[in-house]
Amino acid sequence: MAAYWRKTWPFHVLLLPALALVVLFQYVPLFGAVIAFQDYEPWLGIQNSPWVGLAHFRYLFTYPDGKQIIWNTLIISAFKLTVNLGIPIVFALLLNEVRKTAFKRIVQTLVYLPHFLSWVILGGILIDILSTEGGIVNRLLNSFGLPSVFFLGDGQWFRFTVVVSDVWKEFGFSAIVFLATLVGINPALYEAAEIDGASRWQQVLSISVPLMMPIVIVVATLSLGRILDAGFDQILNLYNPLVYSHGDIIDTFVYREGLNNGQFSFGTAVGLFKSAIGFVLIVISYRMAYKLANYRIF
Amino acid sequence: MRYRSRGYTVFTFSNTIFLSLLSLVCVLPLLHVLALSFSSRAAATANIVNFWPIGFTTDAYVKTLGNEMFLRSLWIGLERTALGTAISMAVVTMAAYSLSKTAHRFPGRQIYIWVFVFTMLFSGGLIPSYVLISKLHLIDQIWALVLPSAVSVWNMILMLNFFRTIPQDLEEAAYIDGAGHLRVLWSVYLPVSMPSIATLSLFTMVFHWNSWFDGMIYMTKPEGYPLATYLHSMIVSDNLSRVGVTLESIENFSNRTVKSAQIFIGALPILLVYPFLQKYFVKGIVLGSVKS
């Protein structure tokens, strides 16, 4: 044991700051989550607050909005997941056909940009351009003789807006992994196909697409693992009481009910419920990604 | 490779048009806001501004930069970005050095890895974190914005993967010269990993600059808001009373051109570092997918 420490102490010392921060800010709250099983009152603390077992979890399912929130989360997430997979794949395939490097560069520069802007900035922009009082998008619709759309004030349209704006923000950046795969394909494969008389379309279908499949499977399974994250940042910056019925997701609900309305225990219970299911889903998705495509993060 | 068929020419043409339009769609909203911010109030109210300022004026910027609340938030935003990035990079680099050693040289490495990775998979959630921050009396302190997110496990993995590509000979030579681990990290690892460290620093800076939610829950007074939080309560939730705006000054804040100017200033630092980011992030992602 002494020999072990003599050999490795510098490693432990270098890890100490990170370990201390992680224990304090990640593991302590993990144990703090026991307040989900209590009626926590800040002035009583964890020691003296009364225990209530699973009452808050049961309440979530009898709560009138409980099922609606879970449904909203799943439906928004499912749409995002599908579109956020499909569009980047098609985009990567199209961009890969571009032969002019300069043009390719410019396109990449422009489409990656929204990824780096925060939802606060983009929320501010979207609220302005989607406004029914002279927002530029509705002005465009009107000029085609179409009626104005209440993008952020009507439930169905709100979901649509959330999905489309998320895709708009992320499709370019999500395409990077697919592009990298396409660029990495051995040109000899295409040359051989060319000699055999395959058209470019046939080459894409029988070379590019199959070789992209493993990474597509990885991205798909990994995003399945995060299906309960429907976009907290985004929705908190776009929603308003008018669309709570269609746009309120688990995370925004926890924030509003738990923190703003001071229902600490109930909020924690909902968060814990989400975390637990999310944990199982992520573990399953990583296993699947490993089984199906031999993917490992480290 | 040559593609000479007529069909392919048609495809190339329409593909170019389509990709150009798609690229435009990604930046036009930002251009519209920029045009608004330089337009006269009358033009903005009349909804005639598209992508070029009408009635050019820098009035909105003069008002924004004369707004004390805005300037204070801007400063706090820069402060948290600088402090947060410095702390995070220091902590992550040190940890990544140890974890980049093989299990043979550093038995126990695996335990640390799991302790860190577990936090990526499971968290106590928003409310227990909030309770902890208030119990630690960090409410209204800048530490609440920089410490909880300091250990980015993802950055740690990227960094340790990079450290592993450093040739062993370099390190061995230093040991033979009698250098300790700290010395090796400082004089061998850091100089050769500058590009990776720069990349991760940029990403961490963007993360801090863009973070707004922690500012909103951990800062009870608007005086402590970083810029992103200020912008959120200003533009998005339109909660003017919260940022302490009085009735007479309300028109200076709430009109569309001033809002647009504030949005644009909020986006500006990102736009400034974007060329550097772009140079590195493709590499960064490829680096992250290196399996070991």
Image (cartoon, grey):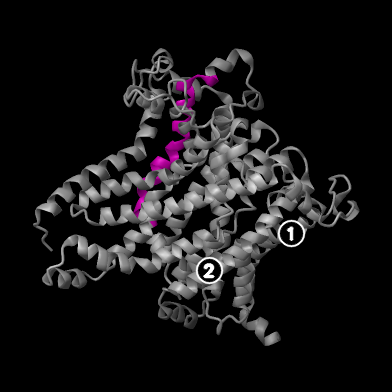
> Position of B47 compared to B223: left or right?
left
Percent of width and height locating residue B267: 45, 37
Label 2 vs 1, first from the N-terminus: 1
Residue B280 visible, this angle: no
Q: Quadrant of residue A253?
A: top right
Residue B58 screen position, x and y as percent = 40, 20
In this rendered view, identify the residue nearer to me: B202 or A81. Answer: A81
Which residue is found at the position 53% from the left and 66% from the top?
A285
Q: Which mark is residue B157?
A: none
Query: Relative to residue B146, is residue B105 depicted above or below?
Result: below
Which contiguous range is marked in magenta? Answer: B253-281
Residue A9 among magenta residues = no
**Residue at the location (61% across, 63% down)?**
B121
Q: Which residue is mark 2?
A: A286
Disc 1 target residue = A28
The residue located at (85%, 46%) in the rendering is A41
Could you say which is closer to the camera, residue B21 or residue B30?
A: B21
Quarter of the image with the N terminus of chain A is bottom right
**Which amino acid type is shown beneath numbered disc 2?**
Tyr
